[in-house]
Amino acid sequence: GAVLTLANGKPTIDPVTVATQQTQENGPCPVLYFSGVTNSEMMETYQIIANEIYEETNGVHWPACAKVVPPAMKKSMRRVLEEISGDHAEAMRMRRKEAETAENAEG
């Protein structure tokens, strides 16, 4: 089903739909890394780009999103990406579990 919807004229994403349809374990996790933008600008941009990545990978990948913060500046890019990818994979597992629990409660 469609993941991208409009709310107040702005694109939004249904994370439960995404979490139940994706399989993040199938390959590397795409990461959208932002700098020099506000949190709201980052999330608006992320929602649009994330949907494009999801569609272009036939529902296989839902990208992680991160913003440059001072503690990350001291780490190698490889380390930062590994941390972001790991956190994202865990969040997606939790969302899938929550969606499965909700689905089982309904059925």
Image (spheres, helix red, strand yellow):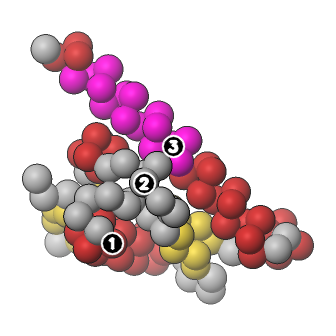
Check whether the beta carbons of the residues at disc 3 and disc 2 lie within 8 A of each other. Answer: no
Q: Identity of the amino acid at label 2? A: Asn
Where residue 69 sits, quadrant-wise, is: bottom right
Is residue 40 in view from this perspective? no
Residue pointed to by mark 2:
26
Residue at the spot 75% in from the left edge and 75% down from the top edge: 77
Q: Is residue 14 covered in magenta?
A: no
Separation (CA) of disc 1 from disc 3: 18 Å
Structural crowding at the residue carrying mark 1, measured as other residues with C-alpha within 10 Å and reported as few (<14), some (14–19) or many (≥20): some
Is residue 24 in view from this perspective? yes
Check whether the beta carbons of the residues at disc 2 and disc 1 lie within 8 A of each other. Answer: no
Marks 1, 3: nearer the viewer: 1
Residue 88 location in percent, x, y?
54, 52
Looking at the rendering, the stretch of residues picked out in magenta corresponds to 89-103
Residue pointed to by mark 3:
91
Structural crowding at the residue carrying mark 2, measured as other residues with C-alpha within 10 Å and reported as few (<14), some (14–19) or many (≥20): few
Residue 42 location in percent, x, y?
48, 74
Give the camera-side residue of 79 and 95. 79
Describe residue 4's horizontal placement relative to residue 30 as left or right.
left
Disc number at residue 53? 1
Say what secondary structure mark 1 lies in: helix
Q: Identity of the amino acid at label 1? A: Ile
Describe residue 103's horizontal placement relative to residue 63 as left or right.
left
Disc number at residue 105? none
